[in-house]
Image (cartoon, grey):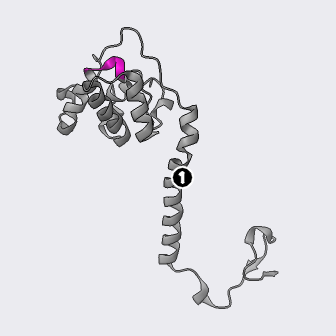
Amino acid sequence: MPIVPEGTLAWFAPSEALVEHADPSTHPTRRAALAALLSAGLGIVLLPSRASAFDARRFSHPTPRAGITGAKVLTAADLTRSPHLVELFDGIRAIPQIADGIGCHCGCAELSGHYSLLSCYEGEAMAKSCPICQGEGRVAVRLAKAGKSLNDIRTAIDAQFG
């Protein structure tokens, strides 16, 4: 079988070729391999923040549905395992027209049956575990209490989460 010289890219070599390493000490250590994987993973995590300017241009918030209510938002009785979220869910329930006019930036809008940030607080309530849904909800509740308009709230959420 032919031997591929060290440093040759393996995918350019014939499939029957073998790479011969003269010195086993040149093999990467587990620590080096893990560091490389961690660096690559960190790059992937940080990539969306660099791409967010592009995404913000094509991200659009939904139009609040006529007659929408907060009746489907989970209550304290539904949140017994997450009592620290009761105040947030109550706040969203109080502003259904605002929450229904905000698109969630966590990507849940791609889920079937999901329409708006309000949807994150209904049914299975993704907001029970998603920090983005929770963060957007907190901003929406705080700014709505301060008398800000839906457009002002959208702008603030886009600036922080977009």
Q: Is residue 26 above or below residue 154?
A: below
Horizontal side of residue 118 vs 5, given as left or right: left
Q: Is residue 30 above or below residue 98?
A: below
Where residue 147 appears, x then y in whole percent? 28, 22
Where residue 90 appears, x then y in whole percent? 22, 26
Horizontal side of residue 9 vs 151, given as left or right: right
Q: Residue furthest bottom?
A: 23
Horizontal side of residue 147 vs 53, given as left or right: left
Residue segment shown in magenta? 94-98
Residue 154: say if magenta.
Answer: no
Q: Residue at x 53, y 36 (%)?
A: 56
Q: Nearer the viewer, residue 56 or 31?
A: 56
Main secondary-structure element of the magenta-colored stretch: helix
Q: Quadrant of residue 13?
A: bottom right
Residue 97: say if magenta.
Answer: yes
Where residue 127 appears, x then y in whole percent? 33, 35
Q: Nearer the viewer, residue 79 or 39?
A: 39
User: Crowding at label 1, few (<14), some or many (≥20) Cα neighbours within 10 Å?
Assistant: few
Which residue bears the numbered disc 1?
Answer: 47
Q: Please, what secondary structure does the residue beneath circle 1 have?
A: helix
Badge 1 amino acid: Leu
Number of marks in the rendered image: 1
Q: Is residue 17 above or below residue 156?
A: below
Where residue 79 appears, x then y in whole percent? 21, 32
Q: Residue at x 22, y 36 (%)?
A: 85
